[in-house]
Amino acid sequence: MPMNLKGYIIPNDYVDIFRMMKIDATSPGEVEAWLKSDDPDKTLRINSGGGSMFAGIEMYSLIKEHGAVNVFISGEACSAASIAAIAGRTVKISPPAMMMIHNVSMGARGDKNAMKHAAMSLDECDSAISQAYQLKTGLDESVLLDLMNKETWMSAKKAKSYGFVDEIAFEKGQEPQVFNAKAQLAVNINTNLRRNITNGLARNA
């Protein structure tokens, strides 16, 4: 069955704390266990505002390595969740759902050298994440870093135009085949009914 990636993206050793507090969260270990399961339906449904950058990167690597995961963004795929989302073999988004990419943030303390080192580390983190975005979208790193620097929120259409998603769900022409079959059946019944009524009237005339 599909897996729901919901709530915060957290490191594996935070799972018990979030469960105790009854806060929605997903860890790389849970994604890995699902990927190793015998369930043939490898659809990952995402509704997450993000969380740990490194947990998101680990999810990305696990999903990419598996190679057969289809992603469906049902609500939001923001920050670290956007990294996991673009790892899918196909990435589909609900029409009102959104994505968001931004610069990595962290806490730091110490003297000016520590602050400079923190800033340099954040630059490297941003560059690392942009590599994953670049593989998905084909956009230049400078363009992606600029989008991240501006904290870019993307509607479904915008995410598709940038190349972060492959398609928008429920668009015209994407109705399930079972729906089309039922619709066609109704048309056939109405056509046959009208034909029978017409033939009956003709015989009684």
Image (tube, rainbow, N blue to C red):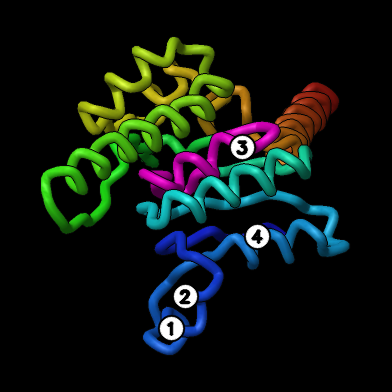
Q: Give residue 201's quadrant in the image.
A: top right
Magenta region includes residue 89: yes
Q: Amino acid at mark 1?
A: Ile
Q: Earlier in the sequence, mark 1 or mark 4?
A: 1
Q: Nearer the viewer, mark 1 or mark 4?
A: 1
Q: Nearer the viewer, mark 1 or mark 3?
A: 1
Q: Amino acid at mark 2?
A: Tyr
* Residue 11 drawn above or below residue 169: below
Decide if residue 91 is on the left or right side of residue 77.
right
Q: CA distance from mark 1 to mark 3?
A: 27 Å
Q: Residue at x 40, y 63 (%)?
A: 8
Q: Amino acid at mark 3?
A: Ala
Q: Nearer the viewer, mark 4 or mark 2?
A: 2
Q: CA distance from mark 1 to mark 2?
A: 5 Å
Residue 197 showing in the rendered view: no
Q: Which residues are magenta?
A: 73-91
Labelled pair 1, 2 in contact (Cβ < 8 Å): yes
